[in-house]
Amino acid sequence: MIVRCIDNTLQRDVLVVGREYEVRAERDDCYILSGFDKRFSKTRFEVVKRCATQHC
């Protein structure tokens, strides 16, 4: 799945508003993005593209 950042409050050093990120995994109410080890709240993103397979 591809998501676009819509809120980088308190994460400005990591996330860029408007940038698209690939979701590697989902847990609880969070996404784990490709290239990152930590979780980010789903409320920070909007879904751009859902993939039929794991990789877009």
Image: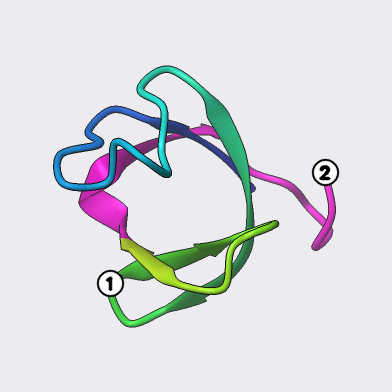
Q: Residue at x 84, y 54 (%)?
A: 55
**Rendered position, 32 above or below 33:** below
Residue occupying image coordinates x 56% and y 73%:
37
Q: Position of residue 16 (x, y in %)?
A: 41, 27
Question: Mark 2 or 1 closer to N-term?
Answer: 1
- Find disc 2 in the rendering and name its residue: 56
Q: Based on the picture, tell me whether residue 55 belongs to the magenta stretch.
A: yes
Residue 50 image-quadrant placement: top right
Residue 49 in sight here: no
Question: Magenta segment range?
Answer: 41-56
Between 12 and 3, the one nearer to me in the picture: 12
Q: Is residue 7 something that shows in the picture? A: yes
* C-alpha gap between disc 2 and disc 1: 21 Å
Q: Secondary structure at mark 2?
A: loop
**In this picture, residue 49 sits left or right of residue 28:** right
Say which amino acid is labelled 2: Cys
Q: Which residue is mark 1?
A: 29
**Quadrant in the rendering for residue 13:** top left
Q: Position of residue 12 (x, y in %)?
A: 29, 36
> Dot 2, crowdedness within 10 Å: few (<14), some or many (≥20)?
few
